[in-house]
Image: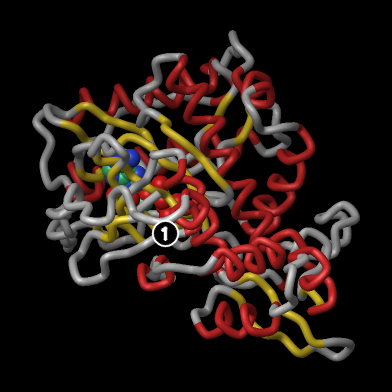
C-alpha cells in the first residue's frame, strides 16, 4: 500500500478524536463496535456518526459488518495518519517525499525533518498478505483477541529501532536511528545503492571478507541478521557496506540459530559466485566461528523491546518465515535504474506557522499534494 498523502489533509479536532478512539478500541476489538467508539471519544455534543462517516470516506477507518455487530476498524491509512501526526509534532518528519522502496512488509519514503535533513521513513506493514494463520494460533495474542497487523507492525518497528540503536552503539555499519512511533521508523538516509544494483565491485574478495566478518562479528555479539542478502546491504562509495533491515534478527541462542546463520553465509556465497564469479574456500561456520563474547540480544531487550514483545513477534516470524526476500536466480539481468530520491521541494513548506489556535494547529497535518513532496504542518 502506498502512503496516501491525501489523507494527511486537515482533519477536525473531533474527527481526530474519533480516529484515536478507534485506535484505542482496537486494542481489545478487531472490529470496534460503534457504542465503544462513542464512549471512548466522549464528544461533548455527540456527533460521532458524522465524524466516523467522514473518516470512512477518507479510508482512515473501514466499516465492518460482521455476524454479531456493526463496527469499524482502523485502516493502514488511519494508522499512518496517527503515526505521521506524532512524528510531525516531534519534528522528525515534517514532509514526505518520494517512495524509494516497496518491500513485502514495508514501504520506504524519503522524508525531511524540521531542520530540513533528509531521512528515511520505513513504514512496517506486517500481515499485508494474510493474517488468517496467525489468528488461528491461540497463543499468539496472549489473551488479546485482535490487533493482528496493527500490533505486529508496531512490534516490528519497535524491534527494528531497538536493534538499530544497539548495533549503532557498537559501531556496526548501520543507519543512524532517529525516531519511532507506532509502525514507523525514521532513520538516516544512506546515500548508497543496494548491492543488488551494483554491477561491479573493484575487489570482490575484499567486500566478501568484510561481509563475512560482519556476519561473524554479529554472532560474537549474540546476533544473526536473518536476511543478510544483496537487498539489505547498501554499498556506499568506495565500497563500504551498510547493513539495513532488522525486524527478523534473531539471537544466536534461538533454536534454529545455526540454520539462519548458515543461510546468511550461503546467501552471500551464492551471490558472489553468480554475480561476481567470485568464490572462496573460506567462509564462517556457526559451530567454530561464533564464540559469543557479548550479549547484544539481551541489551536489545533493555533498549525498549521487551521479552514479551520479542516472544509475540518471534512466534509470528517463526510461523511466517523470516527473511523471505531470497535472491532469485536471475542476477545477471537486473535493473539498476531504480529511482533515485529526487524529492526536490521538501523544504518548501508554505504552511508553517499555521494560524488559529494551537490545538487546532496540532490537529492539522496538511499535505501539499500538488508536488511530490507533501508538507506536514505541526
Ligand atoms: P524491507 O523490510 O521491505 O526489505 P528494507 O529496510 O530492506 O525493507 O528497505 C527496502 C529498500 O529501501 C532497501 O533495499 C533500500 O533500497 C531502501 N532503504 C531502506 N532503508 C534505507 C536507508 N536508511 N537509506 C537508504 N535506502 C534505504
Ligand atoms: Mg529488505
Q: Residue at x 66, y 54 (%)?
A: 152
- Where's residue 318, x and y in %? 68, 51
Residue behind mark 1: 365
Q: Residue at x 12, y 54 (%)?
A: 344
- Where's residue 325, x and y in %? 44, 56
Neighbor class of circle 1 (other Cα within 10 Å; few <14, some 14-19, many 20+) is: many
- Where's residue 200, x and y in %? 11, 41
Residue 230 in view (yes/no) = no
Give the residue furthest to the top. Answer: 293
Quadrant of the rendered structure where residue 153 is? bottom right
Quadrant of the rendered structure where residue 230 is? top left
Q: Is residue 300 left or right of 145 when viewed as pictured?
A: left
Residue 113 in view (yes/no) = yes
Q: Is residue 250 above or below residue 231?
A: above
Q: Is residue 372 above or below residue 165?
A: below
Q: Is residue 177 above or below residue 118?
A: above
Residue sitting nearer the eye, 33 or 352: 352
Residue sitting nearer the eye, 201 or 302: 302
Residue sitting nearer the eye, 59 or 162: 59
User: Does dot 1 land on a helix, a strand or a loop?
Assistant: loop
Q: Residue at x 12, y 27 (%)?
A: 238
Q: Is residue 286 left or right of 273 when viewed as pictured?
A: right
Q: Quadrant of the N terminus?
A: bottom left
Q: Is residue 5 left or right of 23 when viewed as pictured?
A: left
Q: Residue at x 58, y 82 (%)?
A: 56
Q: Is residue 7 left or right of 157 when viewed as pictured?
A: left
Q: Is residue 22 above or below residue 170?
A: below
Amino acid at each position: 500500500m502506498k502512503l496516501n498523502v491525501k489523507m494527511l489533509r486537515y482533519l477536525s479536532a473531533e474527527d481526530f478524536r474519533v480516529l484515536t478512539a478507534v485506535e484505542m478500541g482496537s486494542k481489545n476489538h478487531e472490529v470496534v463496535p460503534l457504542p465503544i467508539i462513542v464512549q471512548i471519544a466522549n464528544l461533548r455534543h455527540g456527533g460521532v456518526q458524522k465524524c466516523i462517516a467522514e473518516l470512512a470516506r477518507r479510508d482512515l477507518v473501514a466499516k465492518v459488518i460482521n455476524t454479531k455487530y456493526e463496527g469499524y476498524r482502523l485502516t493502514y491509512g488511519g494508522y499512518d495518519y496517527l503515526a505521521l501526526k506524532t512524528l510531525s509534532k516531534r519534528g522528525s518528519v515534517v514532509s514526505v517525499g518520494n517512495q524509494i522502496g516497496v518491500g513485502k512488509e514495508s514501504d520506504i519514503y524519503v522524508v525531511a525533518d524540521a531542520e530540513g535533513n533528509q531521512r528515511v521513513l520505513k513504514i512496517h506493514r506486517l500481515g499485508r498478505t494474510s493474517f488468517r494463520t496467525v489468528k488461528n494460533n491461540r497463543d499468539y495474542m496472549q489473551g488479546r483477541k485482535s490487533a493482528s497487523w496493527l500490533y505486529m507492525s508496531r512490534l516490528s518497528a519497535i524491534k527494528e529501532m531497538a536493534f538499530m540503536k544497539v548495533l549503532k552503539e557498537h559501531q556496526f555499519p548501520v543507519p543512524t536511528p532517529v525516531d519511532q512511533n507506532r509502525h514507523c521508523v525514521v532513520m538516516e538516509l544512506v546515500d548508497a545503492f543496494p548491492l543488488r544494483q551494483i554491477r561491479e565491485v573493484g575487489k570482490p574478495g575484499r567486500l566478501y571478507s568484510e561481509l563475512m566478518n560482519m556476519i561473524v562479528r554479529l554472532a560474537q555479539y549474540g546476533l544473526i541478521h536473518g536476511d543478510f542478502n544483496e537487498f539489505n546491504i547498501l554499498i556506499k562509495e568506495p565500497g563500504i557496506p551498510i547493513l539495513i533491515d532488522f525486524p527478523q534478527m534473531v539471537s544466536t541462542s534461538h533454536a534454529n540459530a545455526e540454520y539462519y546463520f548458515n543461510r546468511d553465509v550461503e546467501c552471500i556465497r551464492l551471490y558472489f559466485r553468480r554475480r561476481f564469479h567470485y568464490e572462496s574456500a573460506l567462509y564462517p561456520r556457526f559451530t567454530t566461528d561464533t564464540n559469543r563474547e557479548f550479549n547484544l540480544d539481551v541489551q536489545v531487550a533493555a533498549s525498549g523491546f521487551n521479552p514479551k514483545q520479542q516472544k509475540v513477534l518471534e512466534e509470528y516470524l517463526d510461523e511466517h518465515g523470516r527473511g523471505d526476500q531470497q535472491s532469485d536466480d536471475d542476477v545477471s539481468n537486473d535493473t539498476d535504474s531504480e529511482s533515485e530520491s529526487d524529492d526536490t521541494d521538501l523544504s518548501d513548506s508554505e504552511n508553517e506557522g499555521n494560524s488559529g489556535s494551537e490545538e487546532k494547529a496540532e490537529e492539522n497535518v496538511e499535505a501539499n499534494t500538488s508536488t511530490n513532496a507533501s508538507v506536514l504542518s505541526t
